[in-house]
Image (cartoon, grey):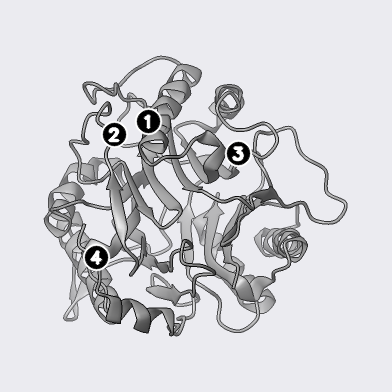
């Protein structure tokens, strides 16, 4: 992967970009953060990128919208001295899984060599005119593509893993045979075990293990599979300090798959579980937050409330308490994900974020991804140790 020169890197470490308001629907939001150490990479977040218009013309097809969204991504990267080659992770949200091949045909033209890691799921999008929505993470730091010899290279335009400093981004993994890349069927437990088998190969190639996982996103084809998935999931994560996690329903691109898991790992001698005051460990195999020397990776949290606005406010109280227990605050948050059972609740939730978080709200990825259970709002964050 091409890496940016030292002069640009030094400049980027010294500056932080202005964050755009998340209240503008489908806007691109960017935050540059200063790393805590040489091994904690600077990360640039770009969220909710769509492309429904070009030169006042409505873009009707997924091919047109994918090109427009990726062009917008390139423009935002270029403004910060970065390029497509500096992107390490991408999340693609499609309104309809039937658009997957058409989207891929355009997407691979923008990432022809050492493409970023990626997860693609079907979701309801805040922009009602959008067929595709993109969120991305990039870095000006040096990176390394992780391609295990025992794991067949993806036929699709993504890399299995990309490491920047001590942080490893792992592509959304599905139940694929490592030798043939073909789907491995079976129930959700069988598939979850195969998923983690493939993730383990990526970790090993990067000189890490399951104990280095800090954050995961689990996309289930059916939320009723959550309990069975959990039983297999806990076989692989560490019992005392499992990674932070969010688990939601996301339509998967291949009907053979029941689960897709996207993870981040970080090698750190200062790893610890963060519990807010009075909090007890739950039964699920996840930590409320994992703190390392460079970042705090928070789990997707949710709380009861009378409506989406109330749920969001109560959830943010829990997140704020967890950040406080880690010695941080909302001002240290660099990335936010909002999962909604009903995406029409997005404006209300974003308004609460703007009310509760000081100053400019960092980049927010918003997607209609139904939750496990009866609640409608789940929020996941990452904060940087400055």
Mark 4 Cα shell of 10 Å, populated few (<14), some (14-19), many (≥20): some
Rendered location of residue 291, percent (x, y)? 64, 55
Q: Are marks 1 and 3 in contact (CB under 8 Å)?
A: no
| SS category of the residue bearing label 3 | loop
Looking at marks 1 and 3 on the same chain, the residue that comes earlier in the sequence is marked by: 1
Q: Which residue is mark 3?
A: 372
Q: Given this view, does label 1 or label 3 mark the residue nearer the observer?
A: 1
- Disc 1 vs disc 2: Cβ atoms closer than 8 Å? yes
Seen at 66% across and 72% down, the residue is 330
List the single residue furthest toward the right: 278
Q: Residue at x 20, y 62 (%)?
A: 2
How far apart are the two marked residues, 1 and 3, measured between alpha carbons? 29 Å
Tell me the SS state at disc 1.
helix
The answer to whether residue 339 shows anywhere in this view is yes
**Where residue 173 sits in the image (x, y, percent)?**
37, 35
Q: Nearer the viewer, residue 180 or 268?
A: 268
| Residue topped by disc 2 | 148
C-beta proximity under 8 Å, tags 1 and 4 = no
Give the label, 4 or 3, closer to the camera: 4
Q: CA distance from mark 2 to mark 4?
A: 21 Å
Tag shown at residue 3: 4
Question: Vertical placement of 248 versus 75: above or below?
Answer: above
Residue drawn at (51%, 44%) of the image: 216
Counting from the top left corner in percent of width and height, residue 8 is at 29, 80
**Which residue bears the numbered disc 1?**
201
Q: Secondary structure at mark 2?
A: loop
Counting residues from the N terminus, which is met first, the one under dot 4 or under dot 3? Answer: 4
Q: Earlier in the sequence, mark 2 or mark 4?
A: 4
């Amino acid at each position: 992967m091409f890496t940016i020169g030292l002069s640009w890197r030094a400049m980027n470490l010294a500056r932080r970009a202005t964050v755009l308001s998340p209240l503008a629907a489908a806007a691109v939001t960017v935050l540059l953060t200063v790393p805590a150490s040489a091994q904690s990479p600077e990360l640039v977040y770009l969220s909710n990128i769509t492309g429904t218009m070009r030169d006042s013309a409505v873009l009707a097809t997924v091919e047109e919208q994918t090109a427009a969204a990726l062009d917008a991504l390139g423009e935002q990267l270029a403004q910060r001295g970065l390029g497509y080659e500096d992107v390490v992770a991408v999340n693609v949200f499609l309104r309809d899984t039937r658009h997957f091949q058409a989207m891929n045909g355009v997407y691979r033209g923008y990432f022809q060599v050492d493409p970023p890691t990626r997860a693609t799921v079907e979701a309801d999008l805040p922009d009602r005119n959008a067929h595709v929505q993109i969120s991305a993470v990039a870095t000006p730091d040096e990176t390394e593509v992780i391609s295990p010899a025992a794991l067949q290279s993806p036929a699709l335009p993504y890399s299995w893993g990309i490491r920047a400093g001590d942080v490893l981004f792992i592509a959304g993994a599905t139940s694929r045979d490592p030798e043939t890349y073909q789907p491995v069927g079976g129930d959700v437990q069988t598939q979850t075990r195969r998923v983690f088998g493939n993730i383990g190969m990526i970790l090993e190639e990067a000189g890490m293990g399951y104990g280095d996982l800090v954050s995961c996103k689990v996309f289930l084809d059916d939320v009723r599979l959550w309990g069975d998935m959990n039983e297999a999931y806990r076989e692989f994560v560490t019992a005392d300090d499992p990674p932070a996690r969010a688990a939601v329903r996301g339509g998967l691109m291949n009907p053979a798959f029941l689960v897709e898991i996207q993870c981040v790992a970080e090698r750190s001698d200062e790893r610890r579980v963060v519990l807010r005051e009075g909090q007890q460990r739950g039964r699920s195999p996840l930590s409320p937050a994992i703190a390392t020397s460079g970042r705090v990776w928070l789990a997707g949290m949710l709380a009861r409330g009378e409506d989406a606005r109330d749920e969001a406010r109560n959830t943010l109280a829990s997140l704020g308490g967890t950040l406080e227990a880690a010695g941080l605050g909302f001002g240290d948050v660099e990335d936010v994900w909002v999962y909604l059972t009903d995406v029409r609740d997005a404006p209300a939730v974003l308004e609460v974020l703007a009310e509760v978080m000081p100053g400019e709200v960092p980049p927010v990825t918003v997607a209609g991804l139904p939750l496990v259970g009866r609640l409608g709002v789940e929020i996941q964050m990452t904060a940087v140790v400055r």
